[in-house]
Amino acid sequence: MVNEASLCVGGIRRKRSLCHQGFEILNGLFCLPTDKSIHELLDLHTISEAKDLQIALGKLRKNRGDYNGKLFAIDPHRINTYSKRIMPAKKSKPKSRSKKNLQTFFCINAITGQPVAFTIGSSGKTISGAALELVDMMKEIVPQGGLFMADTEHAAVDIFKKFKETENYEVLMPMSNTEKLIKYMKGLKYERQWAGYSLSSDTYPFGRKDMLINLISQRIGEIKSKYEYKGFGSTSLHSGNKQMKMLTEDYPKRWTIEEFFNFEAAMGWDKASTMNLNIRYGKMSLALIAQAATYQFRKKLPKPYKNWTAKHLADTIFHGIDGDLKIKKDTIIVTLYNIPEKLKLKKHYENLPDKLVKEGINPRIPWLYNFKIDFRFK
Protein backbone atom coordinates (compact mmCIF):
# COMPACT_ATOMS: atom_id res chain seq x y z
CA MET A 1 0.00 0.00 0.00
CA VAL A 2 2.92 2.34 0.70
CA ASN A 3 4.37 1.43 -2.71
CA GLU A 4 1.04 2.10 -4.40
CA ALA A 5 0.95 5.56 -2.87
CA SER A 6 4.51 6.34 -3.96
CA LEU A 7 3.64 5.21 -7.50
CA CYS A 8 0.50 7.39 -7.46
CA VAL A 9 -1.71 4.54 -8.67
CA GLY A 10 -4.81 2.92 -7.22
CA GLY A 11 -5.32 -0.21 -9.32
CA ILE A 12 -1.83 -1.66 -9.15
CA ARG A 13 -3.01 -5.10 -7.95
CA ARG A 14 -5.29 -5.50 -10.96
CA LYS A 15 -2.50 -4.85 -13.45
CA ARG A 16 -0.27 -7.73 -12.33
CA SER A 17 2.67 -6.23 -14.23
CA LEU A 18 6.24 -7.33 -13.57
CA CYS A 19 7.33 -3.74 -12.97
CA HIS A 20 4.84 -3.30 -10.14
CA GLN A 21 5.48 -6.75 -8.70
CA GLY A 22 9.14 -5.83 -8.34
CA PHE A 23 8.17 -3.33 -5.69
CA GLU A 24 6.25 -6.00 -3.79
CA ILE A 25 8.96 -8.66 -4.06
CA LEU A 26 11.59 -6.19 -2.92
CA ASN A 27 9.56 -5.65 0.25
CA GLY A 28 9.47 -9.34 1.12
CA LEU A 29 6.07 -10.28 -0.33
CA PHE A 30 5.80 -13.64 -2.10
CA CYS A 31 2.74 -12.61 -4.12
CA LEU A 32 0.70 -9.61 -5.20
CA PRO A 33 -2.24 -9.20 -2.73
CA THR A 34 -5.80 -8.81 -4.04
CA ASP A 35 -7.99 -5.79 -3.40
CA LYS A 36 -10.15 -7.93 -1.10
CA SER A 37 -7.11 -8.97 0.96
CA ILE A 38 -6.05 -5.35 1.38
CA HIS A 39 -9.59 -4.37 2.36
CA GLU A 40 -9.75 -7.13 4.99
CA LEU A 41 -6.29 -6.24 6.32
CA LEU A 42 -7.21 -2.59 6.81
CA ASP A 43 -10.57 -3.56 8.32
CA LEU A 44 -8.74 -5.32 11.17
CA HIS A 45 -7.33 -2.02 12.40
CA THR A 46 -8.97 0.88 14.20
CA ILE A 47 -9.02 4.65 13.71
CA SER A 48 -7.07 5.00 16.96
CA GLU A 49 -4.25 2.85 15.55
CA ALA A 50 -4.12 4.98 12.39
CA LYS A 51 -3.85 8.13 14.48
CA ASP A 52 -1.08 6.58 16.58
CA LEU A 53 0.77 5.81 13.34
CA GLN A 54 0.45 9.44 12.25
CA ILE A 55 1.72 10.70 15.60
CA ALA A 56 4.72 8.33 15.59
CA LEU A 57 5.58 9.28 11.99
CA GLY A 58 5.17 12.98 12.81
CA LYS A 59 7.59 12.73 15.72
CA LEU A 60 10.18 11.01 13.52
CA ARG A 61 9.81 13.67 10.83
CA LYS A 62 10.07 16.45 13.40
CA ASN A 63 13.36 14.99 14.65
CA ARG A 64 14.62 14.82 11.05
CA GLY A 65 13.93 18.51 10.57
CA ASP A 66 11.00 18.19 8.15
CA TYR A 67 9.02 20.77 10.13
CA ASN A 68 10.98 24.03 10.21
CA GLY A 69 9.82 26.97 12.29
CA LYS A 70 6.56 27.36 14.17
CA LEU A 71 4.19 28.17 11.35
CA PHE A 72 1.42 25.69 10.48
CA ALA A 73 -1.62 25.71 8.18
CA ILE A 74 -4.90 23.89 8.79
CA ASP A 75 -7.35 23.45 5.94
CA PRO A 76 -10.20 21.12 4.88
CA HIS A 77 -9.58 18.96 1.82
CA ARG A 78 -12.57 17.43 0.04
CA ILE A 79 -11.92 14.19 -1.84
CA ASN A 80 -14.21 12.80 -4.53
CA THR A 81 -15.58 9.41 -3.50
CA TYR A 82 -17.13 6.58 -5.49
CA SER A 83 -18.84 5.06 -2.49
CA LYS A 84 -22.15 3.27 -3.12
CA ARG A 85 -23.59 4.84 0.02
CA ILE A 86 -26.51 7.23 -0.21
CA MET A 87 -25.03 10.59 0.70
CA PRO A 88 -25.49 14.23 -0.36
CA ALA A 89 -23.58 15.38 -3.42
CA LYS A 90 -21.85 18.74 -3.18
CA LYS A 91 -20.29 21.20 -5.58
CA SER A 92 -16.66 22.24 -5.22
CA LYS A 93 -17.34 25.25 -7.47
CA PRO A 94 -20.65 26.97 -8.38
CA LYS A 95 -20.53 25.81 -12.02
CA SER A 96 -19.15 22.30 -11.41
CA ARG A 97 -21.16 19.07 -11.16
CA SER A 98 -22.33 17.89 -7.77
CA LYS A 99 -20.31 14.92 -6.49
CA LYS A 100 -20.09 12.76 -3.42
CA ASN A 101 -17.06 13.68 -1.36
CA LEU A 102 -15.14 12.76 1.74
CA GLN A 103 -14.13 15.71 3.92
CA THR A 104 -10.68 15.61 5.50
CA PHE A 105 -8.74 18.13 7.59
CA PHE A 106 -4.98 18.44 7.11
CA CYS A 107 -2.28 20.28 9.01
CA ILE A 108 1.03 21.02 7.28
CA ASN A 109 4.17 22.92 8.13
CA ALA A 110 3.79 26.19 6.22
CA ILE A 111 7.55 26.61 5.79
CA THR A 112 8.49 23.23 4.28
CA GLY A 113 5.02 22.28 2.97
CA GLN A 114 5.23 18.87 4.65
CA PRO A 115 2.12 17.20 6.16
CA VAL A 116 1.99 16.69 9.92
CA ALA A 117 -1.34 14.91 10.44
CA PHE A 118 -4.95 14.72 9.26
CA THR A 119 -8.41 13.78 10.46
CA ILE A 120 -11.59 12.82 8.59
CA GLY A 121 -15.00 14.42 8.92
CA SER A 122 -18.23 12.44 8.90
CA SER A 123 -21.97 12.87 9.25
CA GLY A 124 -21.57 12.50 13.00
CA LYS A 125 -18.67 14.91 13.34
CA THR A 126 -18.75 18.67 12.84
CA ILE A 127 -15.95 20.75 11.36
CA SER A 128 -15.11 21.89 14.89
CA GLY A 129 -14.99 18.31 16.18
CA ALA A 130 -12.60 17.19 13.45
CA ALA A 131 -10.41 20.26 13.93
CA LEU A 132 -10.25 19.71 17.70
CA GLU A 133 -9.10 16.11 17.15
CA LEU A 134 -6.40 17.40 14.82
CA VAL A 135 -5.20 19.89 17.45
CA ASP A 136 -4.94 17.07 20.02
CA MET A 137 -2.74 15.09 17.61
CA MET A 138 -0.61 18.16 16.91
CA LYS A 139 -0.01 18.67 20.64
CA GLU A 140 1.79 15.32 20.74
CA ILE A 141 3.80 15.86 17.55
CA VAL A 142 4.85 19.50 18.04
CA PRO A 143 4.45 20.23 21.77
CA GLN A 144 6.56 23.38 21.41
CA GLY A 145 3.57 24.95 19.66
CA GLY A 146 3.43 27.70 17.09
CA LEU A 147 1.07 29.83 15.04
CA PHE A 148 -1.70 27.86 13.34
CA MET A 149 -3.42 29.55 10.40
CA ALA A 150 -6.91 28.39 9.49
CA ASP A 151 -9.71 29.30 7.09
CA THR A 152 -12.97 31.16 7.76
CA GLU A 153 -14.98 27.95 8.24
CA HIS A 154 -12.86 27.13 11.30
CA ALA A 155 -13.95 30.34 13.04
CA ALA A 156 -15.96 28.69 15.83
CA VAL A 157 -16.12 29.24 19.58
CA ASP A 158 -14.96 25.69 20.39
CA ILE A 159 -11.83 26.06 18.24
CA PHE A 160 -10.89 29.45 19.71
CA LYS A 161 -11.42 28.02 23.19
CA LYS A 162 -9.22 25.00 22.43
CA PHE A 163 -6.33 27.16 21.26
CA LYS A 164 -6.68 29.48 24.24
CA GLU A 165 -6.41 26.51 26.60
CA THR A 166 -3.44 24.92 24.77
CA GLU A 167 -0.10 26.20 26.00
CA ASN A 168 2.22 27.69 23.34
CA TYR A 169 -0.48 27.41 20.65
CA GLU A 170 -2.08 30.39 18.95
CA VAL A 171 -4.43 30.57 15.98
CA LEU A 172 -5.08 33.16 13.29
CA MET A 173 -8.07 32.94 10.98
CA PRO A 174 -10.21 35.36 8.91
CA MET A 175 -13.68 36.13 10.23
CA SER A 176 -16.90 36.23 8.22
CA ASN A 177 -17.81 39.79 7.32
CA THR A 178 -21.14 39.95 9.12
CA GLU A 179 -22.98 43.26 9.55
CA LYS A 180 -22.23 43.14 13.28
CA LEU A 181 -18.49 42.68 12.70
CA ILE A 182 -18.23 45.37 10.00
CA LYS A 183 -20.04 47.86 12.23
CA TYR A 184 -17.65 46.98 15.06
CA MET A 185 -14.55 47.41 12.86
CA LYS A 186 -15.76 50.79 11.57
CA GLY A 187 -15.77 52.09 15.15
CA LEU A 188 -12.10 51.19 15.83
CA LYS A 189 -9.13 53.57 15.69
CA TYR A 190 -6.65 52.61 13.00
CA GLU A 191 -2.91 53.09 12.66
CA ARG A 192 -1.72 53.74 9.12
CA GLN A 193 0.97 51.29 7.97
CA TRP A 194 1.40 52.53 4.40
CA ALA A 195 -0.72 54.13 1.70
CA GLY A 196 -4.12 52.44 1.62
CA TYR A 197 -3.43 50.02 4.48
CA SER A 198 -4.22 50.51 8.17
CA LEU A 199 -4.48 48.17 11.17
CA SER A 200 -6.32 48.12 14.47
CA SER A 201 -6.88 45.58 17.22
CA ASP A 202 -9.27 45.07 20.09
CA THR A 203 -11.11 42.35 21.95
CA TYR A 204 -14.36 41.18 20.34
CA PRO A 205 -17.31 39.23 21.83
CA PHE A 206 -17.63 36.25 19.48
CA GLY A 207 -20.37 33.64 19.19
CA ARG A 208 -23.54 33.08 21.16
CA LYS A 209 -21.53 32.74 24.36
CA ASP A 210 -19.87 36.11 23.66
CA MET A 211 -16.41 34.68 24.24
CA LEU A 212 -13.78 37.39 24.00
CA ILE A 213 -11.25 36.90 21.22
CA ASN A 214 -8.52 39.19 19.92
CA LEU A 215 -9.64 40.86 16.71
CA ILE A 216 -7.09 42.25 14.26
CA SER A 217 -8.84 44.51 11.77
CA GLN A 218 -7.36 45.69 8.50
CA ARG A 219 -8.72 48.67 6.64
CA ILE A 220 -7.93 49.06 2.95
CA GLY A 221 -8.33 52.32 1.03
CA GLU A 222 -7.65 56.04 1.38
CA ILE A 223 -11.12 57.43 0.71
CA LYS A 224 -13.46 57.06 3.70
CA SER A 225 -16.52 56.26 1.60
CA LYS A 226 -14.63 53.41 -0.13
CA TYR A 227 -12.97 51.77 2.90
CA GLU A 228 -12.93 47.97 2.90
CA TYR A 229 -12.61 46.01 6.15
CA LYS A 230 -11.40 42.52 6.95
CA GLY A 231 -11.19 41.02 10.41
CA PHE A 232 -8.91 38.24 11.67
CA GLY A 233 -9.55 36.38 14.90
CA SER A 234 -6.62 35.43 17.11
CA THR A 235 -6.04 33.94 20.54
CA SER A 236 -3.03 36.15 21.33
CA LEU A 237 -2.68 39.91 21.68
CA HIS A 238 0.41 41.33 19.97
CA SER A 239 1.91 44.72 19.27
CA GLY A 240 1.33 46.54 15.98
CA ASN A 241 4.55 45.32 14.34
CA LYS A 242 3.81 41.70 15.22
CA GLN A 243 0.24 42.02 13.95
CA MET A 244 1.42 43.46 10.64
CA LYS A 245 3.91 40.59 10.25
CA MET A 246 1.21 38.01 11.00
CA LEU A 247 -1.15 39.40 8.36
CA THR A 248 1.28 40.45 5.62
CA GLU A 249 4.07 37.86 5.95
CA ASP A 250 2.85 34.84 7.91
CA TYR A 251 -0.75 34.41 6.78
CA PRO A 252 0.03 34.41 3.03
CA LYS A 253 2.16 31.31 3.69
CA ARG A 254 -1.09 29.46 4.41
CA TRP A 255 -1.31 29.02 0.63
CA THR A 256 1.43 26.40 1.04
CA ILE A 257 -1.26 23.89 2.01
CA GLU A 258 -3.00 24.38 -1.34
CA GLU A 259 0.33 23.73 -3.06
CA PHE A 260 0.64 20.53 -1.04
CA PHE A 261 -2.76 19.31 -2.27
CA ASN A 262 -1.91 20.21 -5.87
CA PHE A 263 1.52 18.53 -5.77
CA GLU A 264 0.96 15.52 -3.51
CA ALA A 265 -2.76 14.60 -3.66
CA ALA A 266 -2.15 11.82 -6.22
CA MET A 267 -0.36 9.80 -3.52
CA GLY A 268 -3.68 8.81 -1.98
CA TRP A 269 -5.63 11.96 -1.19
CA ASP A 270 -7.37 12.67 -4.50
CA LYS A 271 -10.11 10.01 -4.52
CA ALA A 272 -11.72 7.54 -2.15
CA SER A 273 -13.66 4.34 -2.73
CA THR A 274 -14.96 2.87 0.51
CA MET A 275 -16.29 5.22 3.18
CA ASN A 276 -15.55 2.84 6.06
CA LEU A 277 -13.68 5.30 8.27
CA ASN A 278 -11.20 2.86 9.81
CA ILE A 279 -10.20 1.60 6.34
CA ARG A 280 -9.95 5.12 4.94
CA TYR A 281 -7.88 6.30 7.93
CA GLY A 282 -5.52 3.34 7.53
CA LYS A 283 -4.97 3.78 3.80
CA MET A 284 -4.47 7.54 3.97
CA SER A 285 -2.15 7.25 6.98
CA LEU A 286 0.04 4.75 5.13
CA ALA A 287 0.17 7.24 2.25
CA LEU A 288 1.85 9.66 4.68
CA ILE A 289 4.73 7.16 4.98
CA ALA A 290 5.08 7.06 1.19
CA GLN A 291 5.04 10.85 1.02
CA ALA A 292 7.71 11.13 3.73
CA ALA A 293 9.99 8.64 1.95
CA THR A 294 9.46 10.35 -1.41
CA TYR A 295 10.29 13.71 0.18
CA GLN A 296 13.64 12.34 1.40
CA PHE A 297 14.30 10.96 -2.10
CA ARG A 298 13.22 14.20 -3.75
CA LYS A 299 15.75 16.21 -1.69
CA LYS A 300 18.56 14.20 -3.28
CA LEU A 301 17.45 15.08 -6.81
CA PRO A 302 18.71 18.06 -8.82
CA LYS A 303 16.41 20.66 -10.32
CA PRO A 304 13.95 20.46 -12.00
CA TYR A 305 13.21 16.94 -10.69
CA LYS A 306 12.82 18.01 -7.07
CA ASN A 307 10.13 20.51 -8.07
CA TRP A 308 7.96 18.01 -9.95
CA THR A 309 4.55 16.89 -8.73
CA ALA A 310 4.31 13.47 -7.08
CA LYS A 311 2.52 12.09 -10.16
CA HIS A 312 5.13 13.41 -12.60
CA LEU A 313 7.96 12.08 -10.43
CA ALA A 314 6.34 8.65 -10.21
CA ASP A 315 5.61 8.42 -13.94
CA THR A 316 9.06 9.61 -14.99
CA ILE A 317 11.33 7.91 -12.44
CA PHE A 318 9.59 5.20 -10.42
CA HIS A 319 7.65 3.77 -13.38
CA GLY A 320 10.44 4.34 -15.85
CA ILE A 321 13.28 2.42 -14.20
CA ASP A 322 14.29 -1.06 -15.40
CA GLY A 323 16.05 -3.34 -12.96
CA ASP A 324 16.56 -6.79 -11.50
CA LEU A 325 17.15 -8.39 -8.11
CA LYS A 326 19.64 -10.93 -6.83
CA ILE A 327 20.93 -12.05 -3.45
CA LYS A 328 24.61 -12.13 -2.57
CA LYS A 329 25.28 -13.58 0.89
CA ASP A 330 23.30 -11.37 3.30
CA THR A 331 22.56 -8.55 0.84
CA ILE A 332 19.83 -8.00 -1.75
CA ILE A 333 21.43 -6.39 -4.78
CA VAL A 334 19.13 -4.15 -6.84
CA THR A 335 20.58 -3.41 -10.27
CA LEU A 336 19.04 -0.40 -11.99
CA TYR A 337 19.54 0.20 -15.71
CA ASN A 338 19.71 3.31 -17.83
CA ILE A 339 19.37 5.81 -14.98
CA PRO A 340 20.09 9.36 -16.20
CA GLU A 341 23.47 10.43 -14.84
CA LYS A 342 22.11 13.87 -14.02
CA LEU A 343 19.90 12.34 -11.30
CA LYS A 344 23.08 11.66 -9.31
CA LEU A 345 21.53 8.66 -7.57
CA LYS A 346 24.70 6.59 -7.68
CA LYS A 347 26.50 8.65 -5.05
CA HIS A 348 23.56 8.33 -2.64
CA TYR A 349 22.59 4.65 -3.02
CA GLU A 350 25.59 2.65 -4.22
CA ASN A 351 27.33 0.87 -1.30
CA LEU A 352 24.31 1.81 0.83
CA PRO A 353 25.06 -0.56 3.77
CA ASP A 354 28.45 1.06 4.34
CA LYS A 355 26.91 4.54 4.18
CA LEU A 356 24.27 3.57 6.76
CA VAL A 357 26.85 2.10 9.14
CA LYS A 358 28.87 5.34 8.98
CA GLU A 359 25.72 7.23 9.98
CA GLY A 360 25.16 4.89 12.93
CA ILE A 361 22.14 3.18 11.29
CA ASN A 362 21.62 -0.59 11.27
CA PRO A 363 21.71 -1.59 7.55
CA ARG A 364 19.64 -4.74 8.11
CA ILE A 365 15.94 -4.47 7.28
CA PRO A 366 13.70 -6.40 9.73
CA TRP A 367 10.81 -7.05 7.29
CA LEU A 368 13.30 -8.39 4.72
CA TYR A 369 14.45 -11.15 7.09
CA ASN A 370 17.36 -8.93 8.23
CA PHE A 371 18.88 -8.75 4.78
CA LYS A 372 20.84 -5.66 3.78
CA ILE A 373 19.99 -3.88 0.56
CA ASP A 374 22.39 -2.34 -1.92
CA PHE A 375 22.11 -0.76 -5.37
CA ARG A 376 24.06 -0.98 -8.61
CA PHE A 377 23.66 1.38 -11.56
CA LYS A 378 24.36 0.21 -15.10
Image (tube, grey):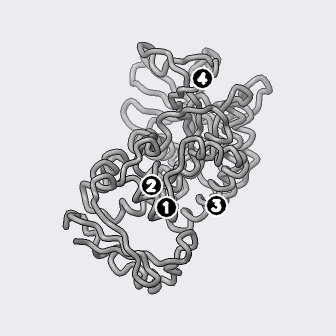
Label 1 or label 3, whichever lies nearer to me, is 3
Judging by the rendered image, the residue that carries numbered circle 1 is 66
| Amino acid at dot 4 | Lys
Task: Answer with mark 4 or mark 2, whichever residue precedes in sequence.
Answer: 4
| Amino acid type shown at disc 3 | Ala
Task: Give the crowd class for mark 3: few <14, some 14-19, many >=20 residues within 10 Å.
Answer: some
Gap in angstroms between the C-alphas marked 2 and 3: 19 Å
Which residue in the structure is indicated by mark 2?
A: 112
Could you tell whether 182 is left or right of 24 in the image? Answer: right
Q: Which mark is residue 56?
A: 3
The part of the image, by quadrant, that contains residue 350 is bottom left
The residue wearing badge 4 is: 84
**Residue 365 percent location from the top left of the image:** 53, 74
Give me the residue at 47% from left, 78% from top.
Answer: 372
Verify CB contact (< 8 Å) between mark 4 and mark 3. no
Give the mark nearest the N terminus, 1 or 2.
1
Element type at mark 3? helix
Q: Nearer the viewer, mark 4 or mark 1?
A: 4
Closer to the eye: label 2 or 3:
3
Sooner in the amino-acid sequence: mark 1 or mark 3: 3
Looking at the rendered image, the quarter that the C terminus falls into is bottom left
Residue at the right extreme of this rendering: 209
CA gap between label 1 and label 3 equals 14 Å
Residue 220 showing in the rendered view: yes
Q: Residue at x 51, y 61 (%)?
A: 30
